[in-house]
């Protein structure tokens, strides 16, 4: 069980620095310390037609934001996003995807439409300190050069047996390696080869409306910008791989 952060407690990241001060999270409903690198807080989004959709927001020190939807008991929305996730919990909806799932009529303004409860009142995320790491990540990404970028958008591979597209998350070096090896073997790759989270050809394909969300930090529906499309870096290229892309990258780094 994650520990609830009390009035005199704050969430901490590795090294002892605080993610949020007492003042920043005071009277915030459902605020919990979830681990060394993230916190959790109850959130929601209101549709004039369907009412409130409630969820749990994870805020990572890296700037990542993930939401588990609890609009109904056992809501399955977002499970398609954990195909290659190392997270055991199903926090995989982006804020924009959660906003859309809630049925919010004026979508695409998730910073203002998604709220947390502070002292009994619904307060937009944009008016809290919860976005400060997200904003820092955006600022850092926009200032990075091509060789320094660390954001990799999600990629898809088609199963050679059922022709269904399967999502690969590229957040860590291990995830990038799994996709890289699968891509090299693309002509023989099938659903049963999916690492980390086993699936079969009988599992449903992710809806096309969800595939547009590929994890770009700049825009949730980005089609491929310099912030999320990487053509080679230390995270997605490997010195022990014999493919031409990895060989060329390794040689260039040594040069």
Image (tube, helix red, strand yellow):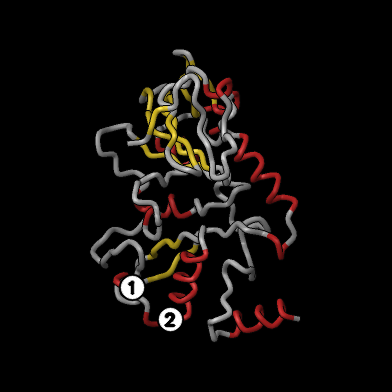
Say which mark, if any, is on residue 185. 2
Using the rendered image of the protein, determine whether residue 44 is visible from the camera's viewpoint: no
Q: Nearer the viewer, residue 186 or 43?
A: 43
In which quadrant of the rendered view does residue 243 lie?
A: bottom right
In which quadrant of the rendered view does residue 52 lie?
A: top left
- Label 2: state its secondary structure: loop
Using the rendered image of the protein, determine whether residue 103 is visible from the camera's viewpoint: yes
Q: Nearer the viewer, residue 10 or 56?
A: 10
Say if 177 sits above or below 13 in the image: below
Q: Position of residue 10 (x, y in %)?
A: 51, 29
Q: Where is residue 3 in the image (x, y as percent from the top left)?
A: 38, 32
Q: Which of 48 and 217 is in front in this view?
A: 217
- Residue closest to the far top: 120
Say if 183 sits above or below 136 in the image: below
- Residue closest to the far front: 16
Residue at 54% x, 41% y is: 13
Instruction: For marks 1 and 2, give the CA distance.
Output: 10 Å
- Label 1: state its secondary structure: helix
Quarter that holds the C terminus: bottom right
Q: Pick whichever of labels 1 and 2 is earlier in the sequence.
A: 2
Residue at 42% x, 61% y is: 167
Q: Are marks 1 and 2 in contact (CB under 8 Å)?
A: yes
Q: Position of residue 11 (x, y in %)?
A: 50, 33
Residue at 50% x, 44% y is: 37
Residue at mark 1: 193
Quarter that holds the N terminus: top left
């Amino acid at each position: 069980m994650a520990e609830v952060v009390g009035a005199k407690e704050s969430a901490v990241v590795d090294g002892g620095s605080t993610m949020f001060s007492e003042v920043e999270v005071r009277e915030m409903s459902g605020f919990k310390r979830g681990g060394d690198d993230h916190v959790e807080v109850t959130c929601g989004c209101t549709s004039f037609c369907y009412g409130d959709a409630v969820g749990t927001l994870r805020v990572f020190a890296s700037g990542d934001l993930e939401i588990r939807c609890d609009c109904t008991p056992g809501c399955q929305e977002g499970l398609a996003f954990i195909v290659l996730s190392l997270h055991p919990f199903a926090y995989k909806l982006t804020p924009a995807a959660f906003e859309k799932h809630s049925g919010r009529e004026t979508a695409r303004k998730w910073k203002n439409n998604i709220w947390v409860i502070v002292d009994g009142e619904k307060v937009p995320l944009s008016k809290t300190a919860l976005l400060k790491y997200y904003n820092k990540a955006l600022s850092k990404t926009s200032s990075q050069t091509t060789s320094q970028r660390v954001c990799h958008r999600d990629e898809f591979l088609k199963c050679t047996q059922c022709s269904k597209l399967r999502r690969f998350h590229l957040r860590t070096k291990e995830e990038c390696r799994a996709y890289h090896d699968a891509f090299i073997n693309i002509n023989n790759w099938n659903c049963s080869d999916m690492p980390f989270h086993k699936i079969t050809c009988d599992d449903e394909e992710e809806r096309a409306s969800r595939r547009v969300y590929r994890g770009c930090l700049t825009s949730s529906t980005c089609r491929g910008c310099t912030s999320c499309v990487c053509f080679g870096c230390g995270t997605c290229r490997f010195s022990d791989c014999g493919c031409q892309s990895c060989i060329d990258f390794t040689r260039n780094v040594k040069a």
